[in-house]
Amino acid sequence: MRPSDYDQEELFMMLEPTLTMVAAGRTDGHRCPVCERADLDCEEDAGQVKVRCPQCGLFFKGMLG
């Protein structure tokens, strides 16, 4: 499947565990919940979280609350 096959709420729910860990500083070793074929590129900087899958193109960018 592709990220475009899901609505925004579904993608957020799929990414929620990863986003929680990235916010806590654990940015490595997260598998893409959409394609399950690649590790996500994750970063947290000054309260901003970015998650990207190099395989399927999943992309998330948001602010920590």
Image: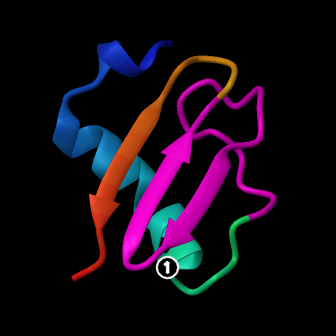
**Residue at the disc numbered 1:** 23
37 sits to left or right of 57? right
Q: Residue at x 69, y 19 (%)?
A: 55
Q: Relative to 61, does residue 26 appear above or below in the rendering?
A: below
The overriding secondary structure of the stretch rendered in magenta is loop
Give the image's coloring scheme. rainbow
4 sits to left or right of 56? left
x then y, percent, for residue 8? 20, 37
10 Å crowding of disc 1: few (<14), some (14-19), many (20+): some
Is residue 48 one of those drawn in magenta? yes
x then y, percent, for residue 54? 68, 25
Q: Relative to 3, does residue 34 appear above or below in the rendering?
A: below
Q: Residue 48's quadrant in the figure?
A: bottom left
Q: Residue 36's quadrant in the figure?
A: top right
Q: Residue at x 81, y 58 (%)?
A: 29
x then y, percent, for residue 16? 40, 63
Query: Quadrant location of the C terminus?
Result: bottom left
Q: Amino acid at mark 1?
A: Ala
Q: Residue at x 38, y 43 (%)?
A: 60
Q: Residue at x 59, y 61 (%)?
A: 43
Q: Residue furthest front?
A: 46
26 sits to left or right of 50? right
Which span of residues is magenta-colored?
28-53
Is residue 30 one of those drawn in magenta? yes
Q: What number of labels is visible?
A: 1
* Circle 1 SS class: helix
